[in-house]
Amino acid sequence: MINYLENLNESQKAAVVHKEGPMIIIAGAGSGKTRVLTYRIAHLMNKDVDAFNILALTFTNKAAREMKNRIATVVGASEAKNLWMGTFHSVFARILRSEGEHLGFPSNFTIYDTQDAVRLLSSIIKEMQLDKDRYKPKQVLSRISSFKNSLITVKAYYNNPELIEADKMAQRPKMGEIYHQYVERCFKAGAMDFDDLLLRTNELLTRFPAVLAKYQNRFKYILVDEYQDTNHSQYLIVRALADRFQNICVVGDDSQSIYAFRGANIQNILNFQRDYDKVEIFKLEQNYRSSNNIVQAANSVIEKNKTKLDKEVWTDNDEGAKVKVMRTYTEGEEGRFIANSIFDNMMNLQLKGSDFAILYRTNAQSRALEDALRKKDIKHKIYGGLSFYQRKEIKDTLGYLRLLINPNDEEALKRVINYPMRGIGASTIDKLSVAANHYKISIFELLQNLNKYDLKLNSGTKNKLDNFITMVQHFQIEAQTKNAFEVAEFVVKQTRLIKDLEKDGTPEGVSRVENVQELLNGIKDFIEVQKEKEEDDSLAFFLEDVALATDFDSDKKDDTPRVSLMTIHLAKGLEFPYVYIVGLEENLFPSAMSMNTRSELEEERRLFYVALTRAEKQAYLTYAQTRYRWGKLVDCEPSRFLEEIDDKFLEYLTVKEPAAMQNKFINEDIFGSVPQNKIRFKKPVQRTPIKKNTTQKIEFQPPKNLKKVTKATVSKSNLFDNNIVVGNVVNHTKFGNGEVLSLEGSGANQKAEIRFASVGVKKLLLQFAKLTIIS
DNA sequence: CCACTTCCATTTTTT
DNA sequence: ATGGAAGTGG
């Protein structure tokens, strides 16, 4: 066992060994916060605290995983396994799975992601016949989200004249009713959105003292990382759980609070000392990460904020190079500058791609950067943006799986009831939805007893609905004996989902097919990993995992070191030797949306602080004078943050004579390694492959060693295969029932000779004939 | 009911 | 610029 106490400075050590009572660790950027947290947990365990009695809440699942691994090196893997560690959302989702029935939720409740929630709100707004321009679903959702994060239930909303008045003033008097409907519909669907996971946990702990006591007793020691970014709902959960033993340890840095937009309340950390008795305060102020120049530069910026705790971050590290500032004319040029700079640094200093990160304010900025990196052939990876699991084909496939786990999941049902198309159109779905709401049952229940209700559907439609429901029930039966992978494979095959995607021969279409296959591989992989860890490998748990996964979570060990591209928000907690912060322009960073109030602007400044303090050796700041926004070229002003850094920490790379720079880059384009005409012609064509190679492939990578095995199992021909054998009685949509006389060919070309009662013997290509096996 | 066309908003950040 | 949503004609 390593002697971890030796690796700590005095203030770190004090925080690690302090045992009982409430404590706050104010940890400056790069001050070894994670180290303190991990060693503290390890230390507790060494001092005979049972791992079962420790709860550690982190900001990302990745952070939890890494911390667990590090703890394992101190206390051993078998002990570390018993720790309960994860994000608020995943930890309390698990608790709600086992305790949710107190609240009337099934243990297999669905987790609605943002898209599901928006869709549900859209249909509610439509059904209520409200103006969708006034009630923008996204805005309504964020309003509801803020209610939930502040623990304002529907009832509380109606008891609060101020809120009602505010919504009236905003021309949205029906907000309360929408909120009410939304909550009802989620409940009926057995679904929780992200905010519900916290809100319902609060409800659980408040309404059921026995449950509260159970978890209070279990979690004798509670640790919360990134406390500056907790919202009110999370704050209350922590308080409730820690109330009995008061062994609450929160870690954070008020200067790095950057999630106010999703309800994070910086007051939680600022007021911690008032919330608990006899709080011990620990300050970690020595920065081990960055050069002195970077630390000082960052300090000089954050000083401009008024709201902050008293703390002085300093470092013993070398002075280091000054922060370099580069102005370019266009965003394309900005990209090229960065690509060139990274390329040069890699060559001159023998560095790997993983030594570099490019950080931006908005995801949209990644385009130009990516283009530039590609042209220089620099391996990179984009984090965030549209994740694998949000792609349409993936959500469709998951829709079926969700539906068979929780048939009441309305959003999943609406997604797949007519996909692939089976002639159940919008008007039918509307009728079903209205009737289901009227009878206060789910659409699935309605469909199961279609004959009990008079829905004025014609018999053809009724038949189609019957077929659909029979199919889903069939899946449910299969799910009882098959594992998650087998079920998914079965579903994909039976629904002919892949076949439908294959009809589209475009590159996008092909990649969609590949994505679905990757999903199946991913499920297989998931099962194996979970088995190894002796953890839940059910389909239900896979779906939960997927719902709460972030981009980093699919980050399998990559063979090639890559330059990381991500938003600054995503970069929180990470560090890189070389960091490029791009797009330092007014209205972009700080964002145009965030300049109305002092507090918003201060949050932008903290965001900039976070960005700058990611760098270990060298930071680059770049900005462009023109940039495409909404398809239009606009002029940009340099960001005020550039002004705010004390000049003595900066070095301007920009040549004073503008024309000289302009020529330099134009020349590079014409005489560089890639001829200009090629660039011009390729550009539009490249767009599509670009997306494919980076956003899809890279984001979701099953380990290489498994790929071979799984590829074979999930080969295309396998998915074509109909399972039809000679002697089967099959049903054809046009010809009715018939007996299979013989089969010939295989895979996509497989044909069957079938004797139909109606039309006699026919030879059909199985790929196209819509056959269902009757017996 | 569906395929095709046109129109529209989108870009702040995410569990 | 781009993709999703709504509208229109078959």
Image: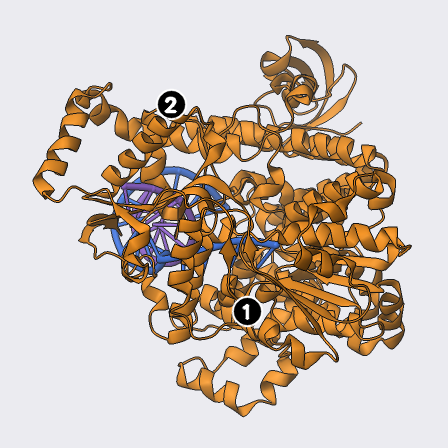
Chain colours: A orange, B blue, C purple
Q: Which mark is residue A347?
A: 2
Looking at the rendered structure, the number of numbered marks drawn on it comes to: 2
Q: Residue at x 60, y 24 (%)?
A: A769
Secondary structure under badge 2? helix
Q: Nearer the viewer, residue A539 or A252?
A: A252
- Toward the top, the furthest residue is A744
Q: Is residue C9 above or below residue A436?
A: above
Q: Which mark is residue A503?
A: none
Query: Do the residues under discs 1 and 2 have CB atoms within 8 angstroms?
Result: no
Name the amino acid, label 1.
Gly
Find residue A97 and report its horizontal and vertical position in percent: 79, 57
A173 with respect to A107 (left or right): left
Quarter of the image for the N terminus of chain A: give it: top right
Labels 1, 2: front one:
2
Q: Nearer the viewer, residue A611 or A746?
A: A611
Answer few, some or many: residues within 10 Å of disc 1's Cα (few below 14, many 20 plus, some between 14 and 19).
Answer: some
Q: Residue at x 69, y 10 (%)?
A: A743
Name the amino acid, label 2.
Met
Q: Nearer the viewer, residue A607 or A758?
A: A607
Residue, disc 1 = A263
**In 3D space, how far apart are the residues under numbered discs 1 and 2 (Cα atoms)?**
44 Å
* Residue A222 occupies quadrant: bottom right
Find residue A92 and report its horizontal and vertical position in percent: 74, 60
